[in-house]
Image (spheres, helix red, strand yellow):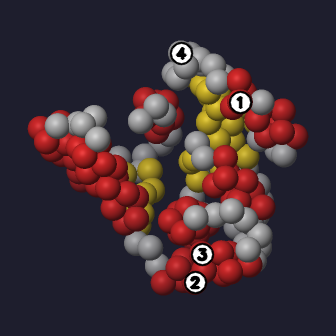
Amino acid sequence: EPMSRPIQDLLISLDPPILISDLTKVEFVSAIARWIRTGEFNKVQAVLVENIFNKDVNSGLFETRRVMPEYFRQAEKWLSARKTALRTLDALHIACSWGYDAKLITCDAIMHQSANRLGIDNIFFIIDLGQSRQSAFGPALRKNGFTPRLLLPHGGKGDLLILQKTGPKKTEPQP
């Protein structure tokens, strides 16, 4: 994945434990299966990556949190309000982030816009400055309260700029 290295650098810069959900683990395994199907990984590479991930989970680098029933209800509420272009699993990720009062890390513009619209105010957004379409997000993100947190030279097609928006303490999310 193009953003794997920059995300890894960002995760290294954060203090452990980094919260992930059971859903994150399922999506990780799904990505590995897709990489095998598309020929990006062979079975040996897949087992190696999966073992490294499990080692990181077991070492305490990642802390797995359950997707609680109320997070499903919150995601359903957001989706049924039809105010965002959220997809099912992204709504669940955002609900978990909100429910656990954790930072949301995304490279997905739709997920970011939706989280912002829903009042989720602790968001990391990553821009590849080597991609003109992405670099155009910068002024709008700054205008909406994002501040630069980290610059990763040559992390993508160009330098990667990581911005963060933080807000007030957790409140009831918007419908």
For the residues labelled 3 and 1, the Cα–Cα distance comes to 29 Å
User: Which residue corresponds to mark 3?
Assistant: 75
Q: In this view, does 52 lie to the left or right of 158?
A: left
For the residues labelled 4 and 3, the Cα–Cα distance comes to 36 Å
Q: Upstream in the sequence, badge 1 or badge 4?
A: 1
User: Which residue corresponds to mark 4?
Assistant: 154
Q: Which residue is drawn at 30% across and 48% down?
A: 34
User: Which residue corresponds to mark 1?
Assistant: 133
Q: Upstream in the sequence, badge 1 or badge 2?
A: 2
Q: Upstream in the sequence, badge 4 or badge 3?
A: 3
Amino acid type, residue under disc 4 in the picture: His
- Residue 8, position as x, y percentages in the image: 43, 34
Q: Upstream in the sequence, badge 4 or badge 2?
A: 2
Q: Upstream in the sequence, badge 3 or badge 1?
A: 3
Q: Residue furthest front?
A: 38
Let me know if residue 84 appears in the view: yes
- Residue 47, position as x, y percentages in the image: 15, 44
Q: In this view, does 163 lie to the left or right of 2?
A: right
For the residues labelled 3 and 2, the Cα–Cα distance comes to 6 Å
Amino acid type, residue under disc 2 in the picture: Arg
Let me know if residue 49 appears in the view: no
Disc 4 to disc 3: CB gap under 8 Å: no
Nearest the viewer among 29 and 147 is 29
For the residues labelled 1 and 4, the Cα–Cα distance comes to 17 Å
